[in-house]
Amino acid sequence: MNATIKAGTNTRISSASKLSAIPLMLALGFPEPGQSMVIGSYFEPAAATPPWTQVASACAPDEAAQHKFTATEADVGFRSGLVTEETVEGSAPYYWPYTAAIPVVARCNVAGAMDHGAPSWNGLVIGYSDPDGSGPTARVTARLVRVSRPWGSTEVIATFDSNRTDNPANTERHEEAVQFFHSFDFSENEYFVQFSVSRSNANLIPAVFSLRLTTLEKIPG
């Protein structure tokens, strides 16, 4: 289930709208206000494992869409005038052109966690914009992937889809979270996060600006 993170000062538990939940949260052992970030129906406590964070523009673009890929500050999206579908020249023995769906794709290596032992992460957070919400014209997806050693086989641990969120009307820049359950083991595995940006209308500007692996707790009630 995807949970919305509102961008700005209203993400802090100390905001007035969250005060009524604080006594119950403290009684159940949740951290004090100021140590947490509210993420929709979850919050991010002060965890023993620091989060893994990444700006989207620092990730490696997939070669299939390098001609469409553009980065501005932290944002990754489409070059002006380009969309997901394009005409591709055929190859032997079929030389006629065909239409292919080629979204903007990038992969981000998850590194640095071995300094802190096995991380307690159970949440994938993605910062993005999808100008038509759950509509079909624009879309952002992401997935966390485990790569086993030494064979390199892969397993998808968590997925996100901007067209299937709990808040489909949100078309602003914001963050959303997906909770998952996995025991990270960096001695036996590597990990990466892959995201994609799609659009069929060049006037819309979907983008990804941040990714995060962190520890999430469910807000009571």
Image (cartoon, rainbow, N blue to C red):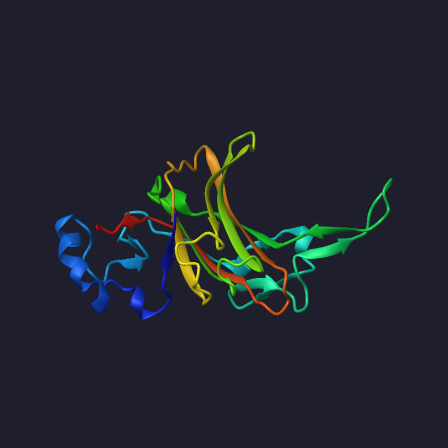
Q: Nearer the viewer, residue 113 or 180?
A: 180
Residue 41 locus on image (x, y percent):
30, 53
Tell me which residue sits at (53%, 59%) in the image: 135
Q: Which residue occupies 82% across, 51% down?
A: 97
Is residue 10 shown above or below 125? Answer: below
Q: Using the image as rendered, state which of residue 198 and residue 165 is in the foreground.
A: 165
- Residue 146: x %, y % from top left: 49, 38
> Would residue 14 be seen by someone viewing this image from the given angle?
no
Residue 98 seen in the figure: yes
Q: Tell me where residue 24 appears, x and y as whole percent.
A: 14, 53
Could you say which quadrant of the image residue 44 lies in?
bottom left
Q: Based on the displayed image, in which of its 4 quarters is residue 120 positioned? A: top left
Relative horizontal placement of residue 40, taking residue 30 as reference (left or right): right
Q: Is residue 144 left or right of residue 15?
A: right
How many discs mark residues in the rendered view?
A: 0
Residue occupying the far top of the picture: 151
Please tell me which residue is depicted at 58% across the width and 53% down the height of the picture: 106
Horizontal and vertical percent position of residue 61: 61, 54
